[in-house]
């Protein structure tokens, strides 16, 4: 862990400093560490930073708590993801209130080429659960990342159906990673760490308090290409997520239901006021998001511009299937010796087919 991590976490703990002001401080000073080493008079010149925040930075009391958090994430193999890191969800980064820090336990690529968030009521009916299962089975061919919130009802249905169909799935939770809420979903969350992950912007010790859920919902809405509302009452978290998604210019889909059905009222309302497209099957997603055209274009580009050897094609196919991977895992999975794989990967990088990331990680361009 870099020394700078202490300051990256520390800046998120400053009282009165939200994600927007934290980014202003970092941009003005040059780094999180530079913020804590800046003089008070410099901090006061930054827009939105007053006496209270400047004094809080200068006192540096939060750094001791940040040290404790570093020990926790190190001991629990949790990856801290800073908003300027390559691993940070790039779709989420486009949102002005995106978290400065994320804490991640899992192996899914948070920048998968296709990411869908599926949300809905905690009191899902058979209609909603059956549609959710059918939709995820249809989605398997597109190898998306499925994001939800690990809650009762539609959320846990989306996670479980993804696991069943060998689709990676990530839960965004409203608490620290020292616990799982609700506790009944702990077994599912453990499976997800091996086939997806658990993600939060809350430090350890943070309880799943009511005010944390809208904050959680902004990540669910921001890190995807589209939000799918399967069932929802006239109020509730799923509608909040849809509203946030609309504000982020994300596509929103809603499953229609019978007039008068309590848990279709929210979906019908979203469709009625043109805040969501009606969804009947995966074809609606494919059409509105242009997935087929995108896949055809990517396939043509690889075939037209680069002649790949059998071994190179094997590496490319595996990266296409799994996302970002370290070189040792690529070698193990493809049975290509390390020295040979390094040469092949370098050639693929020169040809613009893949790109290398810090830590000898690789992903498709």
Image (cartoon, helix red, strand yellow):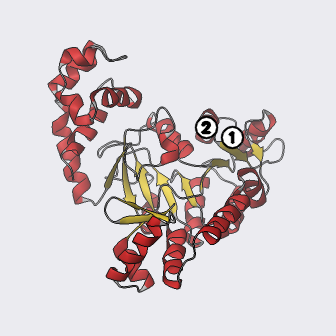
Viewer can see residue 126: no
Residue at position x 51%, y 80% in the image: 314
Q: Nearer the viewer, residue 283 or 235?
A: 283
As drawn, is 313 to the left or to the right of 265? Answer: left
Q: Nearer the viewer, residue 66 or 257?
A: 66
Please count the marks in the image: 2
Numbered label attached to residue 274: none
Q: Nearer the viewer, residue 151 or 340?
A: 340
Badge 2 crowding class, 10 Å Cα cut-off, few under 14, some 14 to 19, many 20 or more, is few
Residue at position x 63%, y 34% in the image: 243
Residue beneath label 1, please?
233
As drawn, is 41 to the left or to the right of 300? Answer: left
Residue beneath label 2, please?
236
Q: Marks 1 and 2: in contact by CB < 8 Å? A: yes
Q: Position of residue 337 (x, y in %)?
A: 35, 85
Residue at position x 41%, y 53% in the image: 87
Q: Position of residue 6 (x, y in %)?
A: 21, 42
Q: Nearer the viewer, residue 246 or 239?
A: 246
Q: Secondary structure at mark 1?
A: loop
Q: Position of residue 202 (x, y in %)?
A: 36, 42
For marks 2 and 1, give the CA distance: 7 Å
Q: Position of residue 65 (x, y in %)?
A: 19, 39
């Amino acid at each position: 862990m870099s020394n700078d991590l202490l300051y990256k976490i520390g800046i998120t703990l400053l009282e009165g400093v939200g994600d927007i002001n934290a980014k202003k401080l970092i941009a003005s000073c040059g780094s999180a560490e530079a913020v804590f080493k800046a003089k008070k008079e410099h901090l006061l010149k930054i827009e939105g930073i007053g006496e209270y925040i400047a004094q809080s930075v200068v006192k540096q009391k939060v750094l001791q708590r940040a040290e404790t958090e570093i020990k926790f994430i190190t001991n629990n193999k949790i990856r801290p993801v800073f908003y300027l890191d390559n691993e940070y969800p790039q779709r989420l980064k486009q949102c002005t209130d995106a978290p400065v820090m994320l804490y991640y336990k899992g192996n899914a690529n948070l920048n998968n080429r296709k990411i869908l968030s599926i949300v809905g009521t905690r009191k899902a009916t058979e209609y909603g659960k059956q549609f959710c299962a059918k939709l995820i089975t249809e989605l398997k061919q597109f190898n998306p990342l499925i994001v939800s919130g690990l809650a009762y009802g539609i959320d846990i249905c989306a996670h479980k159906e993804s696991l069943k169909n060998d689709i990676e799935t990530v839960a965004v939770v409203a608490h620290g990673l020292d616990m799982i809420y609700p506790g009944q979903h702990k077994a599912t969350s453990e499976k997800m760490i091996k086939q997806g992950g658990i993600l939060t912007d809350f430090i350890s010790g943070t309880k799943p308090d009511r005010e944390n859920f809208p904050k959680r919902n902004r990540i669910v809405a921001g890190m995807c290409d589209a939000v799918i509302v399967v069932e929802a009452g006239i109020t509730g978290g799923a509608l909040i997520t849809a509203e946030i998604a609309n504000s982020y210019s994300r596509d929103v889909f809603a499953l229609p239901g019978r007039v008068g059905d309590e848990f279709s009222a929210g979906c019908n309302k979203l469709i009625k006021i043109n805040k969501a497209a009606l969804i009947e099957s995966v074809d609606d997603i494919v059409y509105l998001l242009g997935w087929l055209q995108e896949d055809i274009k990517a396939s043509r580009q690889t075939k037209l511009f680069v002649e790949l050897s059998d071994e190179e094609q094997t590496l490319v196919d595996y990266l296409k299937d799994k996302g970002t991977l370290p070189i040792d895992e690529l070698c193990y999975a493809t049975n290509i010796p390390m020295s040979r794989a390094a040469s092949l990967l370098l050639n693929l990088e020169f040809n613009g087919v893949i790109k290398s990331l810090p830590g000898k990680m690789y992903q498709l361009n």
